[in-house]
Image: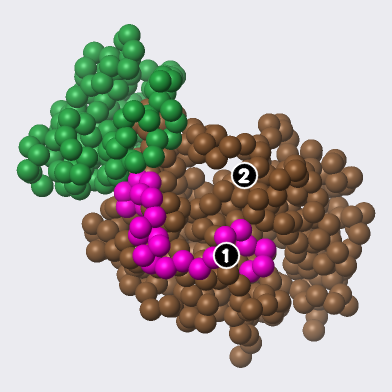
Chain colours: A brown, B green
Amino acid sequence: MTIAPHRAVISGIGESRVGRVPGRSALQLQADAALAAAADAGIAFHDIDGLMTTPLRVERWNMPAGVVAHQLGLKPNYLSTVDLAGASGVAMISQAVQAIEAGLCHTVLCVAGQNLLSHKSRADAVKSMAEGGSAHPQFEVPYGPLVPSLYALIAQRHMHEFGTTPEQLAEVAVAIRQHAGLNPNAHKRDPLTIDDVLSSRMITTPLHVLDCAIVSDGAAAVIVTRQDRAQGHKTKPVYLHGQGFGLRHSHIGEHKDITTTGAVESGAAAFRSAGVTPADIDVAQIYDCFTITVIVELEDLGFCPKGEGGRFVEGGRIRPGGALPITTHGGLLSGGHPGLPGGFFHVVEAIRQLRGEAGQRQVPDAELALVHGNGGVASVHATLILGSQPHGRAP
Amino acid sequence: MSERPQPNPDPATAPYWTGASQRQLVMPQCEACEAFHFYPRTLCPHCGSQAIRWSPVSGFGSIYSMTVVHRAPSPAFEGLVPYVVGLVALDEGPHLMSNIVNCEPADVHIGQKVLATFLELSDGVALPVFEPIDKKSS
Ligand SMILES: [Zn+2]
């Protein structure tokens, strides 16, 4: 095997405890995850010369990357705060690989997380999210939408255009909860039924409380390093094969075709650059802030035709053991959702699956994983295709 | 009850809110290509022109999507639940978010014809909202 001089590989992953983790600050949670990732990669903190993080809602830092680097005792040659809202976690990996392959640094710590649940009451979290930028401050906030309302508008239109049903939406929550039940670090692990979802409190039609992401504490970290530096280490390296980004609107109210998103462009670019198709993907970590998000993304990424997402998720297809297990750590619906960094856990889970270390929820022989992040209200999209082999699928 | 969030106009949006305070719905319209758009953009999304004026529109439209909100986002809305947040497709083309008012939330549906009216929030500040023209229409 030849080693490209500057190719980047993913060599370490780590998570803090996820769920209700009282008494730990955002920085303490991030340190927990970062230390775990460094240990997993077999490196010391002084080997790290790049740092990426995301903004937080619980802290008012004017330069998060600087604060986090300093707090962890790093003196990075390259650092960046990546903000594509919920797509930030996916985007950090893209940027870390680019920085290493450009020769700016050799080992990047990507770390993000916060104590969103314990930091303040749930009511405050709802209010801060509702007014925190997802809704347009002048043209949407005065009408009183919750963040779930902004996605409910997509769901209602999808049901109108394609006949998608509340049961199909509920199936997404049930399937992802089944995955969470197999993840010891997931926040919500008790089994759910379709009826549980449909009989849970209606928040904003057609979305029930169990159609919505939870609120959690937690942090995740990933080490990306130059391939030659990962040689001989015990953990299997994971490779970035393809990536793409997309945007069709800023706020949902100004998008005139709300059942189709920029995931069309991000997915197409990711598959094109990886040289594979949706049929080649063994496991997909789909951003799941709401049940409808998963259905729309599965369509836009090309796993099924537009409008077929509701029928696609039926029959156990996305559950453990299904033809396309999705969001196998339990996602934002059940695994944990510490706000903006929540989508980073999807990346960690894809890497874990490709290393064959996902325990009871391991997808057999997973060689290719897709990770999709979504920021804003289905606004900004980022897609990664990761693999366990250096070059595409083994013949 | 805490106060309902009020729009905070800026130079790019002030004509919209001035229009609303005078019970007139106005929309950005490109002077180069004549197309309407909304929300306000720095450049026309259709042709890229920076020459954008504000033009009155009819206020007629139809419901593109809607949701009945059962859990208030903040105390200001607690007395209003359940209420309808909708996306309205104006007859002139642009979409906007609004509340669908003066009707039973359960009767509101996609495709329903609506007409703009105005909700006075405070002295001089009015919010465009919509009401069904005919509650049986579809
Ligand atoms: Zn124009």
The vertical placement of A312 against B7, above or below, is below
The vertical placement of A336 against A364, above or below, is above
**Mark 2 CB near ligand 1 (8 Å cut):** no
**Secondary structure found at label 1:** loop
Assess whether residue B27 is covered by the magenta stretch.
no
Q: Residues under labels 1 and 2: Cα distance?
A: 17 Å
User: Which stretch did the figure color magenta?
Assistant: A183-207
The vertical placement of B72 against A153, above or below, is above
Q: What residue do we see at 70% from left, 49% from top?
A: A21
Would you say A37 lies left or right of A143 here?
Answer: right
Residue with the most extreme top position = B123
Q: What residue do we see at 68% from left, 31% from top?
A: A60
**Mark 1 CB near ligand 1 (8 Å cut):** no
Chain letter for the residue marked with disc 1 in the picture = A
Task: Say which quarter of the image contains residue A291.
Answer: bottom left
Chain letter for the residue marked with disc 2 in the picture = A
What residue is pinned by disc 1? A189
Chief secondary structure of the magenta span?
loop
Would you say B121 lies left or right of A357 here?
Answer: left
Mark 2 closeness class: few <14, some 14–19, many ≥20 residues within 10 Å: many
Q: Quadrant of the C terminus of chain A?
A: bottom right
Residue A307: image location, x then y, percent: 31, 65
Residue A341: image location, x then y, percent: 63, 50
Q: Is residue A154 visible?
A: no
**Secondary structure found at label 2:** helix
What residue is pinned by disc 2? A117
Residue A336: image location, x then y, percent: 60, 56
Residue type pointed to by label 1: Arg
